[in-house]
Amino acid sequence: MTTDEIRGCCGRRGRKGIDMRSLWTGLTVLSLFVAGAAPGQDLRIGVVDMSRLVQSHPDTANADELLQRQAEEFEMEKDELLEKFKAMRGEFESIRSEASNKALSESAREKKRDEAREKLIALEEFQQEIRETTLKRQQQLSDQGDRMRRRIVGKIVEVVEKHASEKEYTVILDTANRGLSGVESVIYADKTLDITDTVLELIVEPQGEQ
């Protein structure tokens, strides 16, 4: 297997890294918040765009930067492994060539063939190590991105819940959420119901006070 083939099977990650703005997609967050309206109380509904809130949250840029650095470190690690693989493959091919050298005695060629077999086994084992290491690093990045996303979403939910309770909202819906059919959960909502800007101000405000 060539180095390029290994890069392909290992799934080389792009230099652009991982964008937290794409990680939130598919996560059902804040689809419904019920404050428990008392009997006879008017139903007050609000909506937020969680996609925009996640994208605009101050922690998102920091998370993107951290994941980018980690992706670059893992990329450097893989490059080092691939360089080692190329060196090992060169040694194997050299010994295999010597095993066919008619200038050597039969016993010497047999010894070279044994060495070539050992090198080939080591080469295949190291190739597998590269695959496993790459998959492990990809999973680590994915898990780290998920943890960061959950923390950011959790912070947003806390702000929305607090605001909804203070302003006596009964229900808060997420206009960015999609159902299994791919259709938005909230097909239509009057713009006056949208409190995304208000929530964003509440999120950014504590950051400015620091």
Image (cartoon, rainbow, N blue to C red):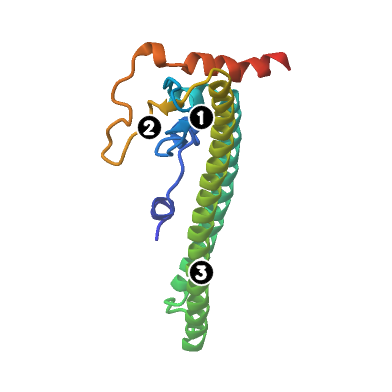
Identity, as a three-letter code, of the amino acid under mark 1: Ala
Mark 2, residues whose alpha carbon is within 10 Å: few (<14), some, or many (≥20)?
Answer: many
Report, in whole angstroms, how far the alpha carbon at label 2 lies from the one at label 3.
45 Å
Identity, as a three-letter code, of the amino acid under mark 2: Asn
Q: What element carries label 1?
A: loop
Whichever of callouts 2 and 3 sits on the residue coming sooner in the sequence is 3
Q: Mark 2 points at which residue?
A: 177
Whichever of callouts 1 and 3 sits on the residue coming sooner in the sequence is 1
Q: Name the residue under label 1.
A: 35
> Is residue 111 shown above or below 63?
below
Residue 210, given in percent of the width and then of the height, sits at 73, 17
Residue placed most toward the observer, 30 or 181:
30
Q: Mark 3 points at which residue?
A: 125
Residue placed most toward the observer, 195 or 137:
195
Whichever of callouts 2 and 1 sits on the residue coming sooner in the sequence is 1
Residue placed most toward the observer, 77 or 134:
134
Location of the N terminus by quadrant is: bottom left
Residue placed most toward the observer, 137 or 126:
137
Cβ atoms under marks 2 and 3 closer than 8 Å: no
Residue 165, given in percent of the width and then of the height, sits at 56, 24
Mark 3, residues whose alpha carbon is within 10 Å: few (<14), some, or many (≥20)?
Answer: few
| Circle 2 or circle 1, nearest the eye | 1
Residue reaching furthest top?
192
Identity, as a three-letter code, of the amino acid under mark 3: Glu
